[in-house]
Image (cartoon, rainbow, N blue to C red):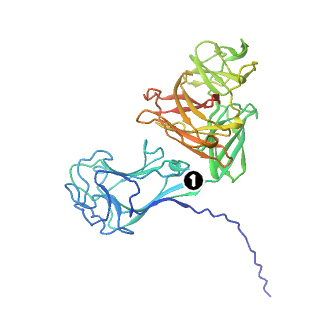
Amino acid sequence: MKIFIIILFIFSVTLVFAEDIWEDGFEELTGWILNGEFEIDSPQGLGGEHGNPDPVSAYAGSNVLGVDLTGLGASLGDYETDLDPHEYFAISPAIDCSEFVGVELSFMKWLNVEQPLYDHAYICVSNDDGTTWIEIWTNSSVVTNDSWSSLNFDISEIADLNSEVRIRFSIGTTDGSWQYSGWNIDNLIITGNSVIYGAIEGNVINENNSEPIAFAPVMSQYGNTMSDDEGYFILNNIPVGIREITINALGYLPFIQSNISVVEDDTTYVLCELEPDPNTPPPPQNPQATVYDENNVHLTWEEPELPTEELLAYNVYRNGIIVQSIIAEEFFDLDLINGFYSYFISAVYDSGESLPTDTVNVQINVTGLENDVIPQSEYSLSNYPNPFNPTTTISFSVTQTSSFVKINIYNLKGQKIRSLPVTLSGDEGLGNNNINTPSPSPIKSGLRMTQAGSKQSSIIWNGSDSNNKPVSSGIYFYQLVIDGKVAAKNKMMLLK
């Protein structure tokens, strides 16, 4: 007798299906910006002096987006010679991807273009309404299509959670001979997964002795924060999925924690053990902090012990944010508002920055002095990308009803170089975001309600000062101000 044993395995699988965010079959005018010989019309099989001509019909329907569909210019059906970079372009309307992650671009293409030694075709994506463009494709060889085929691109790193995404197709540069028929595009679709949020929390510690590391910057694609005095941090409003965080703390090697599984409406814990950098130069010694005249602080410290190279300066940090770089062994922090302040100092050498000193703490609590500090529980503040060039999006949320919000930008010396206002009006502080700036506008903003009912907004800073002049590469700080109340400053880096 044979005995058959049947083992049944049951797997629980959660399937996530992408949604259509935006699509265009080019049968109606939807707001494309067309330049040069780009058209939206019915293809007629024109062109093909070299390569292949345009199709004789659309992939679906009647119309396509293409170059010289109807016989424009000197080379009927083909792009022209001696074009400048991106001279022919077609730019999509702004596409709102602010509630989606895993964003992808797909379309049907029919393309003919000479090899890139001579002619160029491009696809670029912008997430700041066309201010800057990121190339996602260009021809690496001659392309001679004689039929429709599909293309798909993962544009999530550019488009996820952004409200002003645009797609650009372009032709140029071209040389002085051998014209081709160029782009033909149909059935363009933007898809993504509706965003669902979770959170990442954790502790930052020294891997050698398990001591907490305070004021360590914790950065993710979707927001930044800083560890507190006990090394604890939390990143809220992180989209569900496999995520990554990066930590760069003074005196420690860079730390990356990848493969963090963020779960819907839950918090994922990570323990971040940082390895001390053996090449870190010695820090200053014996920091002291004294309060005088009620709301001023006098900081002093001593030179590093046995420095092995030339000392260039000291960096003074308040609540984890650098406030001044100076030469002397003292610093005066003046006219502070009521609150708790933690200070530490580092030394700057040719080879880099030292470990921080021990933290010294003071409390300012003056009767009659208004306490204008925003509790950390009432706001979030981050920017992405960081480092950036030339623009970065500063995102924040506030839980209180507010009539006026602004972002102040400071340089490394603590000088305010830009103020970016956002006026909130209407019921409960909601309504229009009115930002009046000279043309071209250096900032854009958008406002929406978060799941918790807080007001969330973002502003794009293009690296210009109050005179609309580009600032130089370096470290800058941004601070949230709500109805005159201020938050701690966050650090960002401009790299050119």
Task: Tell me which corner region of the image, top left, top right, bottom left or bottom right, holds residue 294.
Answer: top right
The residue shown at (56%, 61%) is: 18
- Three-letter amino acid code of the residue under disc 1: Val
Q: Is residue 285 above or below residue 437?
A: above
Read off the residue under disc 1. Answer: 101
In the displayed structure image, the side of residue 76 where residue 375 appears, left or right: right
Where is residue 265? Give x, y as percent: 71, 52
Kindly give the residue lying farthest to the left in the view shown: 74
Q: Is residue 455 above or below residue 122?
A: above
**Residue 447 in view (yes/no):** yes
In the displayed structure image, the side of residue 387 where residue 88 appears, left or right: left
Quadrant (top left/top right/bottom left/bottom right) for the N terminus: bottom right
Quadrant (top left/top right/bottom left/bottom right) for the C terminus: top left
In the displayed structure image, the side of residue 251 where residue 493 appears, left or right: left
Kindly give the residue lying farthest to the bottom in the view shown: 1
**Residue 250 in view (yes/no):** no
Where is residue 47? Give x, y as percent: 24, 62
* Count of marks placed on residues: 1
Q: Is residue 217 above or below residue 23?
A: above
Q: Is residue 39 above or below residue 348?
A: below
Task: Tell me which corner region of the image, top left, top right, bottom left or bottom right, holds residue 284.
Answer: top right
The residue shown at (24%, 56%) is: 179
Task: Tell me which corner region of the image, top left, top right, bottom left or bottom right, holds residue 51.
Answer: bottom left
Secondary structure of the residue carrying tag 1 is strand
Q: Nearer the viewer, residue 177 or 190?
A: 190
For label 1, the crowd category at 10 Å Cα-Cα, with few meaning under 14, some 14 to 19 and many 20 or more, is many
Kindly give the residue lying farthest to the front in the view shown: 427
